[in-house]
């Protein structure tokens, strides 16, 4: 589930008041220096936990709680499966200022506790049971977001582990976007959806609670986001391309139903788990995820606030329980291609197409998803976002990156930019004043980037590799990985043996005698960079009609004929390929230039770029000396 948060700094003179009947005070890190207190499930078992957590007694107005023995004996508190409320208590009043406080305080990687109020989140204790006849028993927490929380539950009917998403009461409507997505995919079987990389709720039910009536969705238990793929697997190109191809096929299936996803990005794509994990015993699950860590809420007034918050569990890639199959989730802002969103989709600017960036919402459609797909492919393969800079919500910075990558801004966006009082840096006189003529209409000139400065920078920095485009240059830079050489080699071997699984590995960094083991970087071979760059330039086009179609993307040479089988027959593996070079970090100091290159604008940034260029040259010299010494010793 998407766990995006927004922050808002609050001054002491502008306190935030919450409903009096749901007042909360938690042990959280604040400006006054109070430290976060957290408790694990094992602490509860050993009796060392905060007494407020182990004492299960509450006043008559508290929401119910049930211990494991009670669940086992079948005497669970009925209030857990059907929490009751005063008929007049469902009085949620939207408070944009208060809603923005989610994530402001340090709750130990948990949601902000004030979301538990009338119309807000449903309070959940570990051990609670949900659904008809207490079908789903809560064992761990998987995540949270602006619309609710997600819990790992044991399904007492199927005997499998499921993810149960409990929507906030104010988001629980029969016509909510998740229900609309179910309607749009009506007629598609769960097997068909899974085969095409789509995950919708398997079923849904309603529960009543002290904060309102909540819609609950039941989904398979899924793995982590695909965001970290380049950190661990970029040196295994065939495996990463398999994942990327599945992204294309998933989006193609979504579009075949007349639906635009609207928020297609790595945060909304998860890996599926390998077969059998969802049937493991609870002991094995807790060993995989770790015991739940609890953050106590010290003072509670009202039944709608939980006694503690639970930190979300994390499946680590080292465990090797993720398959290479994907699941596209979160259709919360999806829309019919024939009815574009009048107010946009809310996708972050780093993934937003030009029509979204310039608020031309009537022009949204399949092509907008294709643009987001291009950014996602680059991020998954290379580990970089071409349009994400220091302030990804600053349209000027995003537009600068677009011009450096796609080329000068085209109409109708030039006129829109001028109407927004946007500056055209190449249409100025010798004193830097804007020219009072039509020079700004020249589509061969960048609007936000000085042609002279850009050409000078490229001649100086790009001479060594011959790249003619900033994006191409950055793609050729070494990609820092969160691995050491032995771990990278283990992953390579396992990927070759089982291409259907994201390989796990032994974490040697913790056991190595060297307190600071040397990490590795991966350099993508130039031939692959050229192919991927060609594909991206076909996607990143100002004009929507000029962008590549999904069929053209799937048939591009970068995918190596994967579309030959349309995903129904295993594709033939190439006998040999250049997977790129792996080197230790100290052997190459050049990667810093690549990560800075797209966002360079100020003189100070250029000075830093030249500095890193010099360090890169020094690094090459040191590497040459080391290689020579190794050869002499041999």
Image: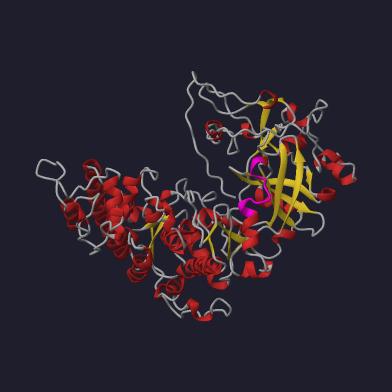
User: What range of the chain is rendered magenta?
Assistant: 170-178
* Quarter holding residue 145: top right
Residue 593 at x, y percent in the picture = 29, 52
The residue at 47%/50% (across/down) is 344
Q: Is residue 110 left or right of residue 590?
A: right
Numbered circles on residues, count = 0
Q: Is residue 352 magenta?
A: no
Q: Is residue 521 above or below residue 496?
A: above
Q: Is residue 172 magenta?
A: yes
Task: Please indicate, yes or no, whether residue 385 appears anywhere in the rendered image.
Answer: no
Q: Nearer the viewer, residue 630 or 168?
A: 168
Q: Is residue 371 left or right of residue 187?
A: left
Q: Nearer the viewer, residue 554 or 20?
A: 20
Q: Is residue 476 above or below residue 92?
A: below
Tell which residue pokes out farthest to the top in this image: 13
Residue 327 at x, y percent in the picture = 59, 61
* Quarter holding residue 370: bottom left
Residue 252 at x, y percent in the picture = 52, 69
Residue 146 at x, y percent in the picture = 58, 42
Q: Nearer the viewer, residue 233 or 583?
A: 233
Task: Please indicate, yes or no, whether residue 555 appears anywhere in the rendered image.
Answer: yes
- Image color mode: secondary structure
Tell which residue pokes out farthest to the left in this image: 430
Q: Is residue 151 above or below residue 91?
A: below
Which quarter of the image is occupied by the C terminus? bottom left
Q: Nearer the viewer, residue 229 or 409?
A: 409
The residue at 62%/70% (across/down) is 195
């Amino acid at each position: 589930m998407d766990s995006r948060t927004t922050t808002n700094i609050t001054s002491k003179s502008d306190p935030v008041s919450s409903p009096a009947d749901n007042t909360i005070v938690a042990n959280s890190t604040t400006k006054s220096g109070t430290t976060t207190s957290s408790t694990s499930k094992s602490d509860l078992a050993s009796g060392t936990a905060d007494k407020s957590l182990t004492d299960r007694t509450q006043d008559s107005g508290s929401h119910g709680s049930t211990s494991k023995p009670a669940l086992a004996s079948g005497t669970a508190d009925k209030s857990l499966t059907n929490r009751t409320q005063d008929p007049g208590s469902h009085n949620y009043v939207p408070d944009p200022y208060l809603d923005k406080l989610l994530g402001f305080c340090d709750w130990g990687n948990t949601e902000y506790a004030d979301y538990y109020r009338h119309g807000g989140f449903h309070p959940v204790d570990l051990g609670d049971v949900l659904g008809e006849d207490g079908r789903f028993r809560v064992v761990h927490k998987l995540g949270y977001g602006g619309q609710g929380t997600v819990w790992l539950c044991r399904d007492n009917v199927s005997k499998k582990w499921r993810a149960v998403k409990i929507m906030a009461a104010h988001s629980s409507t029969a016509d909510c976007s998740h229900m609309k997505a179910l309607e749009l995919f009506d007629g598609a079987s769960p097997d068909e959806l899974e085969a095409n990389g789509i995950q919708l709720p398997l079923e849904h039910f309603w529960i009543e609670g002290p904060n309102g009536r909540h819609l609950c969705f039941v989904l398979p238990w899924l793995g982590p986001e695909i965001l970290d793929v380049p950190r661990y697997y970029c040196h295994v190109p065939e495996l990463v391309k398999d994942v990327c191809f599945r992204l294309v096929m998933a989006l193609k299936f979504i579009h075949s139903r007349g639906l635009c996803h609207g928020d297609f990005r790595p945060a909304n794509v998860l890996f599926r788990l390998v077969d059998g994990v969802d049937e493991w015993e609870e002991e094995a699950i807790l060993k995989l995820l770790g015991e739940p860590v609890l953050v106590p809420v010290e003072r509670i007034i009202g039944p709608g606030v939980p006694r503690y918050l639970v930190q979300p569990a994390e499946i680590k890639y080292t465990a090797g329980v993720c398959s290479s199959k994907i699941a596209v989730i979160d259709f919360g802002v999806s829309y019919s291609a024939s009815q574009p969103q009048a107010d946009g989709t809310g996708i972050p600017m780093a993934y937003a197409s030009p029509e979204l960036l310039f608020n031309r919402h009537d022009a949204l459609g399949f092509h907008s998803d294709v643009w987001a797909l291009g950014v996602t492919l680059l991020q998954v393969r290379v580990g970089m976002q071409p349009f994400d800079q220091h302030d990804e919500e600053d349209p000027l910075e995003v537009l600068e990156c677009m011009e450096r990558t796609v080329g000068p801004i085209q109409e109708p966006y030039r006129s829109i930019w001028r109407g927004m009082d946007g500056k055209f840096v190449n249409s100025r006189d010798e004193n830097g004043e804007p020219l009072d003529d039509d020079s700004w209409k020249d589509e061969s000139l960048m609007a936000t980037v000085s042609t002279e400065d850009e050409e000078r920078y490229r001649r100086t920095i790009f001479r060594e590799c011959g790249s003619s485009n900033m994006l191409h240059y950055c793609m050729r830079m070494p990609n820092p990985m969160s691995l050491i050489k032995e771990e990278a080699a283990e992953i390579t071997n396992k990927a070759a043996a089982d291409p259907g699984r994201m390989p796990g590995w032994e974490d040697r960094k913790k056991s190595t005698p060297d307190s600071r083991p040397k990490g590795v970087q991966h350099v993508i071979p130039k031939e692959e960079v050229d192919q991927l760059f060609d594909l991206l330039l076909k996607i990143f086009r100002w004009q929507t009609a000029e962008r590549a179609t999904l069929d053209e993307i799937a048939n591009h040479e970068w995918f190596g004929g994967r579309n030959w089988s349309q995903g129904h027959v295993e594709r033939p593996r190439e006998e040999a390929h250049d997977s790129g070079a792996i080197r230790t970090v100290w052997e190459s100091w050049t990667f810093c230039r690549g990560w800075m290159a797209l966002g360079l604008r100020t003189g100070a940034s250029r000075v830093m770029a030249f500095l890193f260029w010099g360090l890169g040259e020094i690094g090459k010299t040191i590497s040459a000396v080391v290689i020579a010494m190794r050869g002499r010793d041999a």
